[in-house]
Amino acid sequence: MIEVNNLYKRFEEKEVLKGISTVFEDGKTNLIIGQSGSGKTVLMKNLVGLFEPTSGQILYDGRDFVQMSKKEKVLMRREMGMIFQAAALFDSLTVLENVMFPLDMFSNMTLRERQQRAMYCLDRVNLVGAENKYPGEISGGMQKRVAIARAIALNPKYLFCDEPNSGLDPKTSLVIDELLHSITHEFNMTTIINTHDMNSVMGIGENIIFIYEGHKEWQGVSGEIMNSTNKRLTDFIFASDLLKEMREAVTGGKK
């Protein structure tokens, strides 16, 4: 579990995060949503230590990440897996070598053990048979699955995903969503997904945090969104005519 208590982040005169307090739960897909510029990316970067908060707490199972020394933060990051908006694979390495990379860097496994662990992770994302290919030889959806395999190679307790469906077609996005959801439950990870994808929100949103102008505006689950009375949330979620029609079908046209 990750607890955020009264988190502020300021860049010179601009305050981007304004006292956010929330909890990201174990074994659930926790989604951060909000308009561009709302602060959700800054929030995630604070969570993983790419930014230092101006004030506030970030507690990893009771451990205050903000107060840790540099050495302690390096050790803490070994408990984190990260999936970037672009898959961020190494073009010069094979699929197998990409998945083995964090194992080569941070584990004490033998070469055979690292290969076996990497192949297990590739099997988990249905990519056995692609291990000897290079990133340029596989599709964008397959690259994202390689990135997921690499992110879980060290068996992390916490998984961070920045727009994992960016650039993917709707069908492939569903595959990625289902994969992230299933491995979250399988490994009991605290998974945090920064997304604009409303299909993800409605499909796997087990704990959703809506950020508006640096504040936590709303928190709940996907099943509560359709009936929400929070105008800022509904304006964001039902921006498209299709989603407005879906809401009217569920609510009978009531607002």
Image: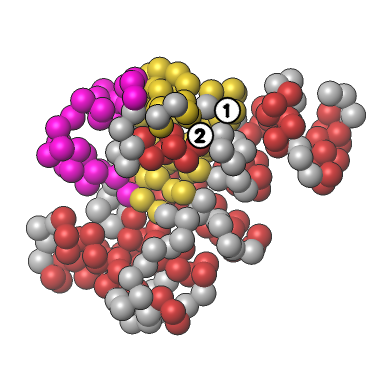
Q: Nearer the viewer, residue 91 or 145?
A: 91
The residue lying at 56 percent from left, 57 percent from top is 166
In the rendered view, does 224 fall on the left or right side of 23? right
Choose the circle earlier in sequence order: 1 or 2.
2
Residue 27, can we see it? no
Q: Secondary structure at mark 2?
A: loop
Q: Which residue is mark 1?
A: 213
Q: Is residue 14 above or below residue 129?
A: above
User: Which quarter of the image is occupied by the C terminus?
Assistant: top right
Hey, what amino acid is under mark 2?
Gly
Q: How is the image coloured?
A: secondary structure
Q: Which residue is mark 2?
A: 39
Dots 1 and 2: beta carbons under 8 Å? yes
Local crowd size for mark 1, using a 10 Å CA cut-off: few (<14), some (14–19), many (≥20): some
Q: Is residue 25 above or below residue 44?
A: above
Q: Secondary structure at mark 1?
A: loop
Q: Which disc is residue 114 wearing? A: none
What is the magenta range? 54-81
User: Which quarter of the image is occupied by the N terminus?
Assistant: top left
Q: Residue furthest right?
A: 253
Q: CA distance from mark 1 to mark 2?
A: 7 Å
Whether residue 78 appears in magenta in the rendering, the answer is: yes
In the rendered view, does 80 fall on the left or right side of 173? left
Hey, what amino acid is under mark 1?
Glu
Q: Nearer the viewer, residue 43 or 185?
A: 43
Q: Is residue 156 above or below residue 5?
A: below
Residue 50 in picture, x, y percent from top left: 32, 42
Residue 186 in picture, x, y percent from top left: 39, 47
